[in-house]
Every structure is written in C-alpha cells, then in structure tokens.
Image (tube, grey):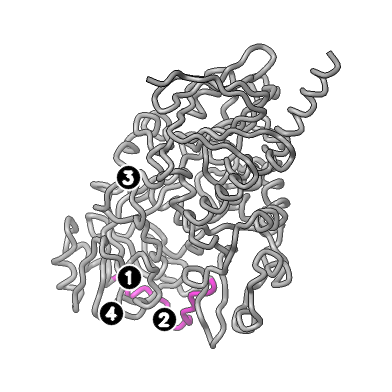
Amino acid sequence: MTESRIYETDIVVIGAGNAAMCAAIAARENGARVLVLEKAPEAEKGGNSTFTHGSIRFAYNGVEDLKQIMPDLTPEDIEVTDFGSYTEEEFFDDMCRITDYRTDPELASLLTSKSFETMKWMQSHKVRWVPIYGRQAFKVDGIFKFWGGMIVESVGGGTGLVEALHEEAKQLGVQVLFNAMATKLIHDDEGVHGVIFKDNGKTTEVRAKAVILASGGFHANPEMRTRYLGPKWDLAKARGSRFNTGEGIQMALDMGALSAGNWSGCHSVGGDRYLPEFTEGFQKLSYPFGILVNAEGKRFVDEGADFRNYTYAKYGKLILEQPEQFAWQIFDTKVAGLLRDEYRGRKVTKVKANTLEELAEKLEGVNKAGFLKTVKEYNEAVQKEIPFNPNIKDGRSTKGLNVEKSNWANTLDEGPFEAFAVTCGITFTFGGLKINTNTEVQDVLSQSISGLYAAGELVGGLFYFNYPGGAGLMAGSVFGKIAGENASRFIHQVKEKEKMV
C-alpha cells in the first residue's frame, strides 16, 4: 500500500479540458508552478472539449487576420473561398441576440474583444487551425462561402485540440495528475489555500496559493439535471464527458461562492434516438434542409428560423417536450448532398423509402395519417418562387401553416426519402459560478474570494436559453487564459508580501 503525499505548488487547476489547459499554460508561462487535477483517466482526459469538432467562434476582419492564425492557408485556398468577416460587434450582437439580451455584458464584451488575440496566442502554443470546409461552407458558382460566423476548427477536432494543449503544457513543465478527483477546497477567512482530492482513490491534498476551477458543468449528473433543469431532464441523453458531474461548482458553492446564470437552461441538441450516452456521432444537425415531425406526425418547430449555428443548442429541449421524447428528421433526394457527415455513419437510426406512403409505414411510433397530412400541407405552403440558397437566410419560406418555416423550405416530393430518428441530448449546462472580468469567483456578498478563479462551462452568466455555436470553446480559451494570467499575478503579489514579513 502506497502512502498518500501532500503536494505543494503555486496554482492548482481543477479539470484538464480546453479552459483548464489554457489556464495552466498561461499560468506557467507567467512563471507559476502549476499542478492540474484531472478526474478522468488519461485515456479519457479533456472533458467535453474532446467531444467537440474543435469548431470555434472568434472575431476577425478578413483574410489577413485569418492568415495570422492559419499560416498554412495557400493562395489557392484564398482564391476559391469567400471567408468574409465577423467583427467584434457582430460577435457581441450575436451573444446578445441569441441569449435574449440576458448575457452578462461585461463578460460577453471581454469574450468578443479578446477572441482574436486568444486565437493567436493558442496558435503560438502550437494549436493548429484549419477552415471548416466540410460543415460550414457550401460551394456556389465555384466559390466556397462560409456562413454563420464560424469558419475555423482545430486540427484533429476536439481530441486534437486537447492533445495539442496537453503536449504544450508538458513541454512547459506543467504537472498533470490523472484519476485525481477534487472533493473540497481548502479555505479559511483569508481565502483558498489548496484542494483535497482523491489520488487514485486515496484522499490527499495539495497546498497552493491559488486555485482555478475549470471542471465543467453538471450535464452528466441526472440528479442535478432534474433538480435544476426540471422534469424529464433525467431522460435526456448525456453527450460529451461522463465525468462532468458538477463537483467543481458544488465545492465553490459549499464555501460561499455566488451562483450565476441560467440554471434551468442548457445546450441541448437533437441526435440519434438509440445511440448510447457519451458516444461521439450523436448529433444530427442538417434539420434546416428538411422537416421535423413528432409522434403525432406534426411539425413542432421552425426548422429554418436561423442558421443551424444559432438554433441547434435549443432544439433538443423542444424534442424532449414532445410525446415520448422523440422526433424524425425527414429529407428528400434534392438535399441529400447537403447532409453533414454524421448522417452517413454506421451507427445511425434511419429509414429509407421511394414514396412518402412507404416512408410513413417505416416511421416507428409516428401516426401515419398525421404525417402524410403534415407533408401535404407543408408542400402546398412552400413559396417555390423564392430561390433556394443554403449559404444565406434565403427567405424561401412557407405560408399559411400553424408552424411556418422561415428559410430553406424545399418541398418533399422527390424520392428516395430518408428519415432519421432523434431525441434530446444534453451537451453542457448554463448555470454556474459568478466571476468578474478578472475571472475571480465572487462570494454571496459579491466580493472576490481570494485565490479562487474559474473558467469554462462552470462559469454562469454567458449563455441563456441558447448559444452561438463555437462560443463555448472560445469562452473557455479566453477566460482560461485570463484566469491563468491573473492567478499568476496574484501569487507573485503573495510571494512579495511573504518576503516583506
């Protein structure tokens, strides 16, 4: 039996995903000794970051900006691509609009204004970026045109992002402990002084001058989901990391931290009805080009309300509210070539038929007459005189339906037809801890808790009801970097005071 040891360092980072590792790297490059506690085994490190595509949203003014973070962009790439621009103002406006203007304006302003410089910083730390041609651009008249304010992903997706950050942290001398579950913050009236954790199941502790919480939300905790999100949320399928069960948030609340944000809200998407939890490939996000029907065969949502980037994170909740918590996505052959790669995998619940009548027989759990009536009324309502264009909100809508479709309304009349069974999957929760613009965790008196910082999904106040795609990774990077820098600055001040005593 090995004896437990007491660790000692300058800064402890709890978590080992994108936000945590950005914090660790920033702290280390500013001279601090850093220890990272990762609850998961090494093979499953990285939290939700590893389950993303690595797609990230940031502000840029044109291709010259993009060349700074993607130096491998070739003249040929630039010639055949309309990258457009996405200004800080547009990013900030999207954050406000998508959250019904509830986002914390100071945090949102910091996120949007620091996004580009943080991308350059990550690139300087060997994170490689490439254009998302496969999912965020359609070719029209020989030119790829990006849409929806998101154009870049990390090489290797989320796994590649996490591996790059871990490799850089290792090169800088950051120590990472796996199978190390934080259980309690060591604190007194003067602030936080370390962490008690389970080191491969054995209780031990690490003494430190600052702690950065970056261990994610509680999406993988059915009890917390039902307590905070409400009834039926225990029935939602958990996506992402099975280790995001809320302990980081709870530890801070237990010592008097202030909660913030949309505790009854979360990022939830539509995805495969029968795929197991915590499995990659769950989401099915090409719904703007088809229709969604429930068990009654009825449409219940405007599939074309906005670009997918601005609606997918809230449509999972709408599916959860349907009878038996499922729906079917329906497409005809006209749009088959526009469906994302996740529709073509082996582990996909789908049916195919040459006629709508034949398809109706195959839609498990769906009222056949209701479905055929819905499609007939929908086809008759499509404004066919308006041209279809997947790169813009084309205004090709329906007219006269109880639930209209605002854009990309194509008739369902050319077989073969394909249908995909979907249910609600929860990705991450929106409620969390209150921080200020220095990422210092606030207490219930709205005062900073000395030595305690937070970044990533356990920060509350950024996202309400909905979420602009790619903004979560960017927030983790921006606030992780800020947390690492400010925690380092704090411990230097502490050390200077200690020298004077």
Q: CA distance from mark 1 to mark 3?
A: 30 Å
Overall secondary structure of the magenta section = loop
The residue stretch that appears in magenta: 377-392
Q: Is residue 186 left or right of residue 333?
A: right
Q: CA distance from mark 2 to mark 1?
A: 12 Å
| Of callouts 3 and 2, the N-terminal one | 3
Of 444 and 396, the residue lying toward us: 444
Asked which secondary structure carries label 2, the reply is: loop
- Callout 2: 10 Å neighbours few (<14), some, many (20+)? some
Q: Which residue is mark 1?
A: 378
Q: What type is the residue that disc 3 sits on?
A: Lys
> Could you say which disc has been placed on residue 413 in the image?
4
- Residue 254 higher or lower than 424, as above or below: above
Q: Which residue is painted at 46% across and 75% down in the image?
A: 396
Q: Which residue is mark 3?
A: 237
Q: Is residue 124 left or right of residue 143?
A: right
Q: Which residue is mark 2?
A: 384
Q: CA distance from mark 1 to mark 4?
A: 11 Å
| Of callouts 2 and 1, the N-terminal one | 1
Q: Residue 367, how many percent across, how many down?
A: 17, 59
Residue 40 visible somewhere in the drawing? yes
Q: CA distance from mark 3 to mark 4?
A: 33 Å
- Residue 280 higher or lower than 387, as above or below: above
Residue 475 visible somewhere in the drawing? no
